[in-house]
Amino acid sequence: MTVTEFRDRVPATEHIAVRCVDSDVHPMPRRGELVPYIPEPWRSRFFLDHRVGELIYYDAPDYVHAMAMRVDTFPPDGEFAGSDPDLAFRQLVIQAGADIAILEPAARTPRLAQAHQAFASALNDWQHHHWLDSRNNWHQRWRGSICVAIEDPAGAANEIEKWAGHPYMAQVLIKAEPRPSWGDPVYDPIWAAATKHDITVSCHLSRSSYEMLPMPPVGFPSYNHDFMVTYSLLAANQVMSLIFDGVFDRFPALRIVFVEHAFSWILPLMWRMDAIYEARKSRMDINRKPSEYVKDHIKFTTQPLDYPEDKTELTRVLQWMECDKILLFSSDYPHWTYDDPRWLVKHLPESAREAVMFRNGIKTYHLPETVPALEGQVRVF
Amino acid sequence: MPERVIQPRLAQGREHIVATVDEIAPGSHKLVPIGRHGVGVFNVNGSFYAIANYCPHEGGPLCSGRPRGRTVVDESVPGDAVMVRDLEFIYCPWHQWGFELATGTTAVKPEWSIRTYPVRVVGNDILVQA
């Protein structure tokens, strides 16, 4: 028997507890859908006049066919993976069991700061009209990201002011590649706007372009897989800059999330920073151990989860770094690196499961404790 | 919203008539609701194979992936690689782990190979022991 599933797009009056917050989900505009939201003159003078082809260089398996996506996430209308809110809702919320999903549009990063800001603002309007509206977010499971170009701090602060207070915008989304590093006071207007509205600032891994590619100290790597590991170096540098340049002392309410930068490296980095702090604290303006700043202000997402063959070693590392204080669950749907929440939760120490799967997410993004119930939804644990 | 198939689950551990021969064209498959995750019955160039619809890597729905061959080195052609034995492998839609339909063997991690099931064709019926 084949039945077509209808949902009335009316939230149930009955509520259930939020038990899984997914902090990394990628919506994608359908072809041409974003264009009307790009402000002029950038729409005509830059984006429509500066067409680019394939921007991804990537070594995912079967890339020509799968485009580095889960192949079952392409909607039947021929549009790209992640472009259909109903399909994403069915696969991620109903079938995988994510109760609330943080949407992070993967944006192009034009080299001109103003063009980048125009593109980011278009993504915000597009999310508002195509994912967070009452038709597509009738179930109240989607949360959007206020996308901003950090290399234009004043423009970024304006964009935060424009969207803060939106009932379904859960965070500010920035990139890590622009220079100088985040500890520089040039970015203070962004941290000030975010803390003024008590909204978390997240950074999803990106690549930027040209000389803004995340370059390791010894120069560009030869291969893509080498380059993939470089992302963590970028995040590590920003963590050090945030702490030692005193950003969390200037903005004690600031919360930062590193999305998809991996996280196993934070344990030795905390040890190293604490050791340097212990030896030189008389010369520093910061007044707490660096690891305490990390645990109070910074979160990392679980995908990609790196582990040795013996997974008890992973459990020990998670306990040593106090993963219940610094991790947020993420799936990366619909990318091919997707982690299913029911698979991920098995790898967490039992005492940390509730914190990582939903408590930290609720606190970080100021989410509700309950959502309208959905018939047939998988519960993760 | 796309269609979702809701079928009663069939009992495990016996032989089932799952389809007629003309129901599964070469290169296509039918998902049969046997066991917890279902069994995919594939037509590979006229031969039928049955494999568990469950990827041992992260638990993905294996059979909704893409059937194709495997890629091997061939330095005599542009790109130094060719695909051989087209359609004899199924690749999981989530992370592209590939499994040989005839044996359930995966090259990614051979010790995690999965169940395949005996298939018979009797007259116009396809029978699967699963």
Image (spheres, coloured by chain):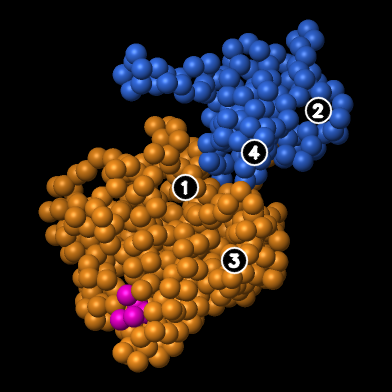
Chain colours: A orange, B blue
The part of the chain drawn in magenta is A241-245
Residue type, label 2: Ala
Inter-mark Cα distance, 4 to 2? 17 Å
Residue type, label 3: Leu
Q: Position of residue B60 (x, y in %)?
A: 62, 42
Q: Position of residue B51 (x, y in %)?
A: 70, 28
Q: Give whichever of discs 4 and 2 has the lower sequence position.
A: 4
Inter-mark Cα distance, 2 to 1? 33 Å
Mark 1 lies on a secondary structure that is loop
Dot 3 surroundings within 10 Å: few (below 14), some, or many (20 or more)? many
Q: Residue at x 62, y 69 (%)?
A: A319
Q: Residue at x 63, y 64 (%)?
A: A316
Q: Residue at x 34, y 68 (%)?
A: A237
Per the rendering, the mark at residue A335 is 1
Give the residue at mark 4: B55
Give the residue at mark 3: A318
Inter-mark Cα distance, 1 to 3? 25 Å
Specify whether disc 4 shares its chain with disc 1.
no
The chain under label 4 reads: B
Viewer-side residue, A285 vs B8 = A285
Mark 3 vs mark 2: in front: 3
Q: Position of residue B81 (x, y in %)?
A: 39, 21
Q: Give whichever of discs 1 and 3 has the lower sequence position.
A: 3
The chain under label 2 reads: B
Give the residue at mark 2: B130
